[in-house]
Image (cartoon, rainbow, N blue to C red):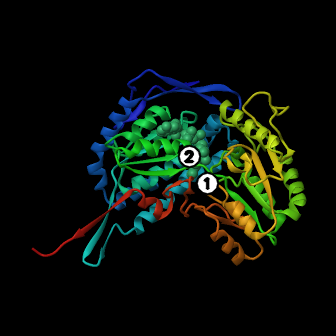
Amino acid sequence: MKTYDKIYINGQWVSPAGKDKVDVINPCTEEAIASVPLGNEQDVDKAVKAALQAFPSWSKTSVGDRSKLIAKLAEAIAARQNEIGDTISREMGMPSAWSRMIQAGLPVATLSSFVPILENYQFSYPMGRTEIVKEPIGVCGFITPWNYPLHQLVGKVAPALAAGCTMVAKPSQLAPLNAYIFTEIMQEIGVPSGVFNLVPGAGSKVGYALSSHPDVDMVSLTGSTKSGIAVAQAAATTIKRVTLELGGKSPNVLLEDADISMAVTKGVYNCFLNSGQTCIALSRMIVPAHKQKEIVEMAKAIVESMVMGDAFTDGVYLGPMVDDAQRQSVREYIRAGIREGATLVTGGPETPENLPKGFFVKPTLFADVKPDMIIAQEEIFGPVLCIIPYQTEEEAIAIANNSVYGLSGSVWSADLEKARAVARQIRSGQVFINGADFDIDAPAGGYKQSGLGRERSKYGLEEYLEIKALIAQNP
Ligand code: NAD
């Protein structure tokens, strides 16, 4: 078991102000694999001061220098990709092959994408009599979750570095080890002192302190809608900019003429990726009522063929839930679905027979789900897919939009223009058409209660910029 006892402030590994610490548990084995310190308000204050001090010089660095540093960071993460992927597998349970590719691969891709964005971005330009100047917003506070922990952290660090901001990051208590590796890398590649600071800890303490700190100009959270509300409320008293990447309940609409076999296969694998612990999971499959039977049979066969087990066993697609609380919550949702009268096709709330240890939940498929049932409305964040039948295209669109969330979505049709027309009517930040692959260059973010602001692309960069108008005349 590895013990971390330091936090990272002003380019140094220092002891935190308090003595609190927490064990990091491997959810596949239920064993403690490491211990990390829990920071407090005093640590946040020190880290924010360091970031504030570093801001004047860092914000004046050239675009070329910042772009070189971002490219170097991408390279250094790529060099440790397998180690990072495996660390994340150990702390949150995603199967190692997927974790190396997604959990460690996406941060490299995100960082690399900001090099050309930065080089092509117009930081100043004339607008009539006025000159527009885009300037970094200042000190940023980052609060991140456990499900794609490094991807979420880098989704904030990359544009903040690009813009010339300085920052304090608070990773999730459940999966903080990747953030330690990331910080080591930031130190090794020579990110100037104070530009990046790491204060692990509880959301209610460190997260709150960051959100309410008067010297933090912007706070960005990826997490649940509940935490988003808390952060926005805490940030309100100091009028800081708030960006939020929150929960989802994303619809996957199969139109009448869709290629059912492709749509069901891709849709099921998408929903169960990372055991359903994915914010953009397509967790509601909305299907023509007269095809539901055929679709359910296909989906059942795929779900039952998925191998669940330890993150380091070959061929495993489904890992455990991140912790016992998450397992209990997902099982409770499965019970709610049964109680409300949805048809349980496969899975269920019981412990999987072959996996008595680890926080595993059986992959579960519900059919005949009604749009207003709890399992169709709330984010389950587990391996549960709801199949919802519809009669008309208008009804399918109405069901897709019958949600407080609006993060992602998907439409399938043999007619691309028709799919686009339906996609335009779905109120969410992204819509994938006919199984198109994830696009690292596309902006991502939520409508409605799925969030505020965008990450990635030039729109992600702009979240970290202030707009100044210079209105001048000759003396
Ligand atoms: P969570 O909201 O419990 O925690 C996220 C972070 O917020 C953690 O670091 C936590 O310590 C902190 N936090 C909790 N309460 C806080 C408070 N009162 N003040 C400040 N910080 C606080 O979420 P989670 O369980 O770690 O992650 C799962 C959730 O994240 C899901 O809802 C998922 O949809 C969402 N998510 C969204 C995206 C996206 O891009 N939209 C991506 C990944 C995850």
Q: Is mark 2 within 8 Å of ligand 1?
A: yes
Q: Residue furthest left?
A: 475
- The answer to whether residue 131 is above or below residue 214 is below
Callout 2, which amino acid? Thr
Residue 173 or 246: which is nearer the viewer? 246
- The answer to whether residue 250 is above or below residue 396 is above
Please state the horizontal and vertical placement of residue 93, each as a whole percent of the image.
67, 38
Residue 143 or 152: which is nearer the viewer? 143
Q: Residue furthest top?
A: 19
Quadrant the N terminus occupies: top right
Q: Which mark is residue 405?
A: 1
Badge 2 element: helix
Q: Which residue is mark 2?
A: 225
Question: What residue is shown at x 40% (from left), y 44% (from top)?
Answer: 235
Q: Quadrant of residue 295?
A: bottom right
Q: Is residue 81 visible?
A: no
Residue 190 or 255: which is nearer the viewer? 255
